């Protein structure tokens, strides 16, 4: 059993059944194929991918492309999102590899102990929103209900589309000569609604393709994630 699996088993994240108001914990890894310190974080995220109760996502940024290798998954909107997190937290700099847990806790992406601690904390929280997302052909039906008074605010509803695994042979830059497998690589991130949480949410969103998807309900900023669910 790997170190991170042992840590996660200790906090029971692999066996807890989802409750109506218990959101999946979203772990966003900001990474780059041009970053020499990122592969261990990419591997750590891979150990989370597919586990119950966790939505682990790789978001590739573009600000290391100048080092000699253009990241094929990089998207400037992910750089903007990471900068938004930094601004919300009062930080002036961004870096890779960085993990953001639940939209609010920021850690270095290689710190397995810190990751396990934060996941355990988030597991203990009950979400103020009950969320379900179902695929119907090329549409995703999103249904949510406020489960507490904390769910009355302005929220952004996101549809995230990702690839389960992608292996890249890196020819130049800091990781030249390495074959790296990336997990849950985000290919599309779309805002599909704004919601005030005062009544039920019913949204149908276009989502072509048969790859995995998730719905995330989050405070603006980006800020704290109030609810998240994989699309069934």
Image: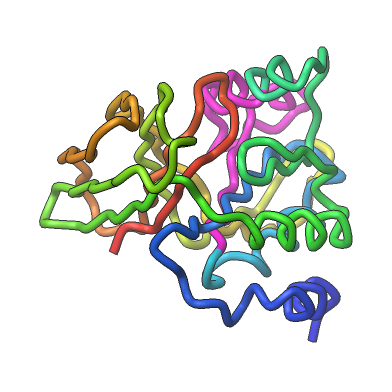
Q: Give percent across and percent down for residue 144.
A: 29, 46
Q: Report the coloring of the rendering.
A: rainbow
**Residue 107: x, y in percent?**
82, 42
Classify the position of the C terminus by image quarter: bottom left
Residue drawn 22% across and 58% down?
134
- Residue located farthest toward the bottom when viewing the structure as drawn: 1
Quadrant assignment, res 45:
bottom right
Q: Residue at x 73, y 63 (%)?
A: 120
- Foreground of the two, 115 or 206: 115
Q: Residue furthest left?
A: 137
Q: Is residue 175 left or right of residue 149?
A: right
Residue 212's quadrant in the figure?
Answer: bottom left
In magenta segment, residue 52: no
Tell me where the magenta segment starts and ends, as one range. 54-82
Q: Viewed as shown, does residue 140 lie left or right of 198?
A: left
In the image, is 68 to the left or to the right of 62?
right
Most foreground residue, 136 or 72: 136
């Amino acid at each position: 059993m790997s170190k991170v699996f042992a840590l996660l088993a200790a906090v029971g994240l692999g066996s807890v059944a989802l409750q109506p108001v218990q959101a999946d914990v979203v772990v966003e890894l900001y990474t780059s194929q041009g970053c020499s310190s990122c592969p261990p974080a990419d591997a750590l995220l891979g150990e989370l991918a597919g586990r119950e109760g966790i939505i682990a996502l790789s978001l590739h940024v573009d600000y290391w492309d100048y080092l000699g290798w253009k990241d094929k998954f990089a998207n400037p909107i992910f750089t903007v999102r990471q900068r938004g997190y930094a601004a919300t937290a009062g930080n002036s700099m961004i870096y890779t590899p960085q993990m953001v847990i639940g939209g609010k806790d920021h850690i270095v992406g290689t710190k397995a102990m810190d990751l396990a601690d934060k996941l355990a904390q988030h597991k203990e929280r009950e979400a103020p929103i009950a969320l379900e997302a179902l695929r119907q052909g090329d549409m995703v039906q999103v249904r949510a209900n406020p489960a507490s008074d904390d769910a009355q605010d302005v929220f952004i509803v996101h549809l995230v589309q990702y690839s389960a695994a992608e292996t890249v042979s890196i020819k130049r830059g800091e990781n030249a000569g390495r074959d790296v497998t990336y997990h849950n690589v985000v290919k599309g991130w779309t805002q599909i609604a704004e919601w005030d949480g005062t009544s039920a949410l019913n949204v149908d969103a276009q989502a072509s393709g048969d790859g995995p998807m998730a719905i995330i309900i989050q405070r603006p900023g980006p800020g704290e994630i109030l609810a998240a669910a994989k699309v069934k």
